[in-house]
Image: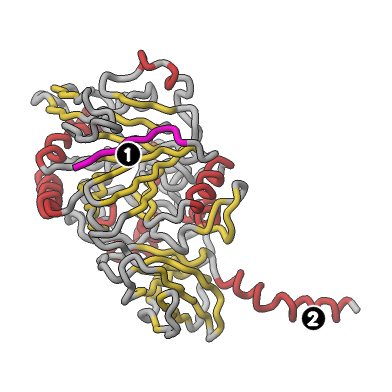
Amino acid sequence: MRILGFLLLLAGLGPGLRSQEAFLAKPYLQVGAAPKADRLELLWLARDVDHAWTVTLKTLGESAWKSASAATCRTVTLAGLPPHRIYAAKLQGLKAGAAFQYRVSMDGRTVFEAKGRGPKNATQPQHILLFGDGATGSPHQKAIAARMAQQDPDAVFILGDIVYSRGRASEYLDRFFPIYNADEHGPGQGGPLMRSVPFIPVLGNHDVMPLNARGDRPSDGLAYYLYWSLPLNGPLLKAGGPNTPIIQPLYWSEFLKGTGPRFPGMGNYSFTLGNAHWTVLDSNPYVDWLDPALKAWLEADLREASKATWRFVLFHHPGFNGSVAHAEDQWMRLLSPVFEKHGVQLVFSGHVHAYQRSRPLTFKPEAATDATAARKGLADVNGAFAIDRAFDGHRATKARGIIYVISGAGGAELYNTKQDHKPESWQAFTQTMVSDRYSFTVLDLKGGRAELRQLAEDGTEIDHFVLTR
Ligand SMILES: [Fe+2]
């Protein structure tokens, strides 16, 4: 009887069980190494076992299924983790902003199915989410993920400290993929976001954090370079060279086998989505953004983006922060003149576990600034501010200067929670601070109108402003 029961169980659960077991991380969308208007990339993680994988897709409402590109595969063999494979297939021929359906099959049997939307074109409105400092596994992370899934966004940007506490592959598998790509959305679990929306991350300090003060790395650290597929158009960097994170020599060859060309260049990149150009920078202190080669790349990137309606820059360590926490981390202010010269409108950061928004401002650093000491947090970056106090984001919506937004309350423990009730403790440039709520940013772009709302984990709106060109 027991054997019969076991056989019945196998017969009943077999296909479901096998599809659950097919993935270490369920399929997730990416913009890919060379983003194009009509395509996205689909990645998934599976065990290091041979199977025939295929992906098919169709525009929603049409009947004909077509094949995605053949899946490519990288094998990850890192000490402490089961060997596994990262598969990637290109979903081509997508229609701008149109819903599509895709299926992933293993050995001829469909094991996963989901919907997505083709990248928007320059005339279509965009509904974008941003948050930082999320994946600790906390109930707040899960509540934010569930809330974001209800938003049905076009893209989700992560403003660094993607996964705690050391950017390890094991941490992605434990508290990142299962929450942002949960099968259903609910406050206790997260939401099915990544299968339908490309996530676009920024490197934070925790994503490159060593194990100890000696700089030893975990064998599965720097997993950013393994699991994301992002534009490979950043400044030319050399593994082991300046402006790159250090890899532990012990794990060097296994690590590079998994990352391929993604390391070290994928820390900085840019791309255009609809009418907005996004430039993503690695702001970790090992990067000297005044290095002529890096600065030239940034200048050229923003110059080429001059036709885009919106130019947004993202990096983890905010240059203009009104919190007590991390007040000494000011080195990214040194790039303000470059951003201003090329008409950047908004800069987004995380790192400070709070929500903040600056008044529109311009900033000219003092020539005598010691940039090296500033990157170590040992010297302030002082300079001349011009703060636009007329902008109110409701009636006066044209800004004179750049608005610096910090959205770092995505799940990790909040900082300085009493400070939002003490505006006298803020900086002169701080317009708004909400430090006692977990939150994420909703950015709606429609032509030359950008509307930003900050939503708390219970859905309450805690800030709102409009910016017009
Ligand atoms: Fe951080």
**Image quadrant where one finds the N terminus:** bottom right
Foreground of the two, 447 or 49: 447
Asked if one can make out residue 209 in the rendered structure from this viewpoint, the answer is no
Q: SS of the residue at dot 2?
A: helix
Total residue callouts: 2
Please name the residue shown 11% across and 47% down the image. Answer: 299
Judged left or right of residue 332, residue 146 is right
The kind of residue on which mark 2 rests is Leu
Picture colour scheme: secondary structure
Based on the displayed image, in which of its 4 quarters is residue 435 positioned? top left
Q: Which residue is mark 2?
A: 7
Q: Is residue 34 above or below residue 413?
A: below
- Tell me, yes or no, whether the two marked residues, 2 and 1, touch with CB atoms within 8 Å: no
Which residue corresponds to mark 1? 349
Q: Position of residue 247 (x, y in %)?
A: 34, 51
| First in residue order: circle 2 vs circle 1 | 2
Region in magenta:
461-469
At 22% across and 28% down in the image, what residue appears? 373
**Circle number at residue 419:** none
Q: Is residue 420 above or below residue 28?
A: above
Q: Residue at x 34, y 65 (%)?
A: 97
Q: CA distance from mark 2 to mark 1?
A: 54 Å
User: In terms of image quadrants, where is residue 409?
Assistant: top left
How far across and down, in percent of the image, does residue 229 sit?
A: 34, 62
Would you say the beta carbon of the disc 1 residue lies within 8 angstroms of ligand 1?
no
Whether residue 296 sits left or right of residue 238 in the image: it is left
Residue 330 occupies which quadrant of the picture? top left
- Percent x, y of residue 137: 55, 45
